[in-house]
Amino acid sequence: MNQKIDLIRENNFPREKEFTPGFLTSLILLTISVLLFVVIIENEGKGYHESRAFAPGTPLFTLLPAIFVSGHTIANGLQAFSGKALTPANLSTQIMTLAGILFTYIIIPTVFFFNWRRRRIEIKSVSTINPLSFSSVIYALSIILTISIAATAMKSAIMHQSLEYAQAIQSDRDAIIDDLVFIALDAYQYKVLPKGLDGGQGKYLGFALAPERAKTQNGIYIATVNENQVSVKAQSLQFPSGVIHATIDEEGQVRNCRFEGAFK
Amino acid sequence: MDWNNKMEKIALNQILRTPNWRWIATAFCFFVLFHLLLFFFLSDFSYQFFIFWSRAAIIFSFLAFISMYVGYRARELVMIESGIAAILYILTLKLLLPSYLAIPVQLQNIYFLIECVILGFVFAFGGAGIGWWLKRKYRVNRL
């Protein structure tokens, strides 16, 4: 390679040859279309946000239709919560959402993978840089958009998974607290009953967990009995690190819950 | 005159020559296609480009990155062209999508727009220069 020759060649090379024929025209037309598209969607969107209870910034057309639809569902939920009738999405919203889904999950990846395949077949081992062509711009666009879609989809999936996990923990914790409440009822019942009826005669001493209370589908329970209170340790079966320490007081109420591990 | 001096002279001549309108148009189109369209689709991010300076830094860096590609692909040094295209791009945003340039109220004045234009020019100018330098360094078989 001779850099000097390269440089001379480069400086004498006609400017027009840097682009394929029709490149600039196509690029400018595409740019104008994109600008018009963005401006129209943005202005339409403003009117849309004013008429509906959507958070500002939610576009009418989006590459994330799932999030857009979730937003609509939440808005409907809020309306239902405040006693208002549900308003179904209007036709234009439905069309734009469908367009978003088709564009995001079908058109862009298809363009990307077809271009990728074509280039793999055509370009074997060429190290030269070819003139800029319109197809390479479309290819680059499809790469960027596909990567963006994949990244946001993965992020959503991870968030969804972590949300599901948190919800499962919360639900298990609630179920164990329910079990503790039933244990407290049993213990209090034992306390108030006279000895003749297998009770504690005003004391918790002698109280033992029934087998169906000591182990439920939610967790394992161990009770330590004193005269005036019962301490219960509950360990989750689904999340073994999740432990609740609770005290059943003189009134049979569950008090002083202490959460450990996954329940923290 | 040694090789480095020649290169500097050529670079200076290329910066001072008449701007190549084709590359101005191309860079501008690239900004719209790869910058505006991308951030438009990633809507959470695009809405109000400059609401935080940290966000603005990412926006301008991406502008520089696109200019870097322009600088890499062009046969001449197109720093001025990229800078002009960036100015046109910022002004287009101001005209057509003013909400994208929305900023905290206390900064909403003409000086902020000038700052944005200057920053856009500087980032694009620098990006194209880096692209040109990278091309010089790594491109093997040209033409």
Image (cartoon, coloured by chain):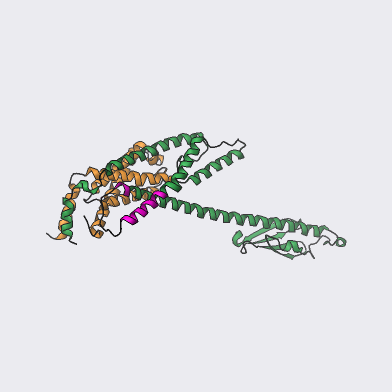
Chain A shown in which color? green
* Residue at the extreme right of the image, as rendered: A196
Can you say whether A109 is above or below A93 in the image?
below
Q: In this view, does A80 lie to the left or right of B40?
A: right
Q: What stretch is highlighted in magenta?
A: A109-136
Q: In this view, does A16 lie to the left or right of B58?
A: left
Q: Which of A260 and A154 is in front in this view?
A: A154
Q: In which quadrant of the rendered view does residue A178 lie?
A: bottom right
Q: Is residue B117 left or right of residue A189?
A: left
Magenta-drawn stretch contains A139: no
Position of residue A215 measured from the top left corner of the image (x, y, whole percent): 71, 63
Q: In this view, does A60 lie to the left or right of B58?
A: right
Chain B shown in which color? orange
The residue at the point 31 percent across, 42 percent down is B89
Position of residue A233 measured from the top left corner of the image (x, y, whole percent): 68, 63
Can you say whether A233 is above or below A160 in the image?
below
Can you say whether A95 is above or below A14 in the image?
above
The residue at the point 32 percent across, 39 percent down is A29
Position of residue A145 measured from the top left corner of the image (x, y, whole percent): 40, 49
Magenta-drawn stretch contains A113: yes
* Residue at the extreme front of the image, as rendered: A121
Q: Which of B118 and A139 is in front in this view?
A: A139
The residue at the point 58 percent across, 38 percent down is A79
User: Number of callouts in the render?
Assistant: 0
